[in-house]
């Protein structure tokens, strides 16, 4: 099995090649670079260094969202274009699940949080149990206090994602020593984690034709919200 995984849903642009149970190449950039400028060169680099041609791929995994509207569209367009040219399917992978999958050795509940602006986060929760990766709370957009309130009073939770620096103080104030935080190298989306998880999804038949793939936004874009507000106020 050979899978190219890409993600541009958050701050990091990342690509990795998984072949026959091994991560052959893995590359990421998190330095305020424009995803549209770096993603294609990154894909070419990891494929070249992995010694895998696009036609050898069984599928392309892509971070489906939630996340940055622009980043998601870049990732979706890139994956769809490549898969349509090589006639291979897309494996949609939740951007939140990618973050959580970084922490495969963690025994506690894992709560990825992505800063959704307007004092909200994109979040879900997961656990690794008996070798299986399970979703506890499905992806949603909500306030950070609502997110924290979903966990039991005795429950330890590992938080990760770009929302941690924004909301860490609030989380610690509400949860105290029950709150744990992922180290920097495991805190953001990682294409290697996406690729390994995507291999599991592929084996379960959880992939789609490239023409059918759509990103998961969870809420309207700012432009769409502003349009609806204008219409509600009787303005064009």
Image (cartoon, rainbow, N blue to C red):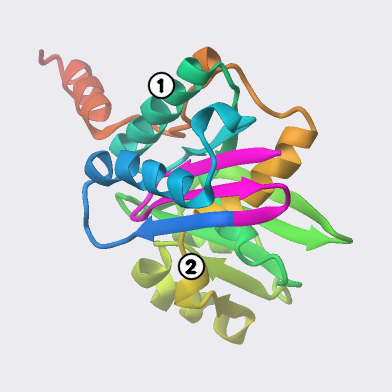
Q: Is residue 220 left or right of residue 182?
A: left
- Residue beneath disc 2: 187
Up/down of 224 relative to 92, above or below: above
Q: Residue 11 or 147: which is nearer the viewer?
A: 11
Q: Residue at x 45, y 29 (%)?
A: 79
Task: Specify the farthest residue to the bottom.
Answer: 177
Q: Which residue is mark 1?
A: 81
Q: Is residue 236 above or below residue 30?
A: above
**Residue 142 x, y percent position in the rendering:** 47, 48
**If the image is split into quadrants, where does the N terminus sit?**
top right
Chief SS of the magenta region = strand
Q: Is residue 20 magenta?
A: yes
Q: Check if mark 1's residue and mark 2's residue have beta carbons within 8 Å.
A: no
Task: Give the magenta range.
Answer: 1-23
- Classify the position of the C terminus by image quarter: top left
Q: Classify 10 Å Cα crowding around label 2: few (below 14), some (14-19), many (20 and above).
A: many
Question: Residue at image x 40%, y 62%?
Answer: 163
Where's residue 195, x and y in %?
60, 47
């Amino acid at each position: 099995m050979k899978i190219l995984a890409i993600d541009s849903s958050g701050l990091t642009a990342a690509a990795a090649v998984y072949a026959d149970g091994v991560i052959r190449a893995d590359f990421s950039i998190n330095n305020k670079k424009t995803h549209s400028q770096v993603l294609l060169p990154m894909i070419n680099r990891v494929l070249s260094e992995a010694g895998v041609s696009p036609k050898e791929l069984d599928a392309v995994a892509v971070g489906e969202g939630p996340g940055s509207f622009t980043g998601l569209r870049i990732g979706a367009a890139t994956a769809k274009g490549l898969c349509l040219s090589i006639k291979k399917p897309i494996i949609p992978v939740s951007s939140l699940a990618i973050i959580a999958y970084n922490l495969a050795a963690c025994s506690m509940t894992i709560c990825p949080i992505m800063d959704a602006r307007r004092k909200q986060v994109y979040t879900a929760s997961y656990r690794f149990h008996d070798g299986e990766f399970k979703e506890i709370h499905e992806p949603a957009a909500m306030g950070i206090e609502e997110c924290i309130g979903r966990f039991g009073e005795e429950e330890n939770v590992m938080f990760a994602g770009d929302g941690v620096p924004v909301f860490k103080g609030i989380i610690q104030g509400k949860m105290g020593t029950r709150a744990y935080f992922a180290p920097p190298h495991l805190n953001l989306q990682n294409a290697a984690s996406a690729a390994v998880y995507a291999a599991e999804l592929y084996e379960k038949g959880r992939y789609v034709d490239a023409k059918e793939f759509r990103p998961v936004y969870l809420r309207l874009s700012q432009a769409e919200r502003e349009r609806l507000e204008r219409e509600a106020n009787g303005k064009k």
